């Protein structure tokens, strides 16, 4: 389902560090008017690094969370291209670079939250420096096979649910081998 964009005359009722909440008066089908509300946040990127035929996954902890599985990535900075952000995040969080990038898909949230997340594959990654960690994260890099990756994606503490849904839809459509090939080629 695709929603119309937030109207130009919407009021900002809250602006936080990440989220902005908008409200506006919306005419309904019966002619009455009600307050509608949406939120938005800056777009971010997710990276699936591939090194030596293995998928690299983050085992991460943040100050406000328990240990969880995830990908590498973060927010797209003002004026930054999504691929540039993916390259920057990969380097920051793993100390690796790649010369071969592929957009796997983009998740577009358009219901109550407007937010886009491109998911990139970084093929043939190579280490060029130690990975650095921000004060708000502890990240271990865990290499795994495609089958192990599928198992981790089904764990309740895997924090890249759009990827899990994408892979599930590919499996249902009989395209799981195509996804495996795209990741590990």
Image (cartoon, helix red, strand yellow):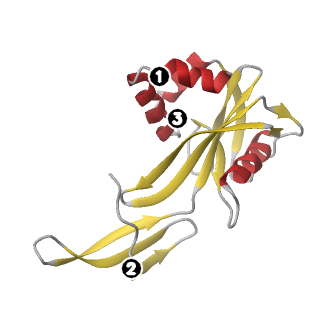
| Residue 145 spot, x, y in % from top left | 64, 18
Indicate whether 143 appears above or below 95.
above
Determine the residue located farthest toward the right in the rendered image. Answer: 128
Q: Residue at x 14, y 70 (%)?
A: 29
| Residue 184 spot, x, y in % from top left | 66, 22
Indicate whether 67 appears above or below 108.
above
Q: Earlier in the sequence, mark 1 or mark 3?
A: 3
Q: Residues within 10 Å of mark 3 (few under 14, many from 20)?
A: some
| Residue 108 spot, x, y in % from top left | 47, 51
Q: Residue at x 44, y 53 (%)?
A: 109
Q: Earlier in the sequence, mark 2 or mark 3?
A: 2
Q: Are marks 1 and 3 in contact (CB under 8 Å)?
A: no
Q: Earlier in the sequence, mark 2 or mark 1?
A: 2
The quarter in which the C terminus is drawn is top right
Mark sitting on residue 10: 2
Q: Which residue is mark 1?
A: 175
In three-dimensional space, the C-alpha distance between marks 2 and 3, rounded to whole angstroms, equals 35 Å
Determine the residue located farthest toward the left in the rendered image. Answer: 30
Indicate whether 78 appears above or below 63.
below
Q: Is residue 147 left or right of residue 26?
A: right
Mark sitting on residue 166: none
Q: Is residue 123 left or right of residue 181?
A: right
Rendering quarter of residue 98: top right
Q: Residues within 10 Å of mark 1 (few under 14, many from 20)?
A: some
Q: Secondary structure at mark 2?
A: loop
Mark sitting on residue 158: 3
Q: Secondary structure at mark 3?
A: loop
Q: Secondary structure at mark 1?
A: loop
């Amino acid at each position: 389902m695709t929603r119309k964009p937030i109207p130009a005359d919407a009021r900002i009722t809250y602006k936080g560090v990440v989220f902005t909440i908008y409200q506006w008066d919306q005419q309904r089908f019966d002619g009455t008017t009600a307050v509608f509300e949406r939120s938005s946040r800056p777009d971010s990127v997710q990276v699936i690094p591939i090194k030596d035929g293995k998928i690299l996954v983050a085992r991460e902890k943040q100050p406000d969370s328990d240990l969880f599985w995830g990908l590498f990535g973060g927010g797209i900075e003002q004026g930054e291209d999504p691929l540039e952000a993916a390259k920057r995040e990969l380097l920051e969080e793993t100390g690796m670079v790649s010369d071969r990038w592929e957009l796997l898909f983009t998740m577009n949230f358009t219901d109550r939250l407007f937010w886009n997340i491109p998911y990139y594959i970084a093929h043939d990654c190579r280490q060029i420096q130690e990975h650095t960690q921000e004060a708000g994260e502890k990240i271990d890099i865990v290499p795994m096979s495609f089958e192990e990756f599928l198992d981790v994606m089904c764990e309740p503490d895997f924090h890249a649910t759009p990827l899990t849904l994408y892979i599930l839809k590919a499996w249902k459509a009989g395209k799981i081998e195509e996804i495996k090939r795209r990741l590990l080629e």
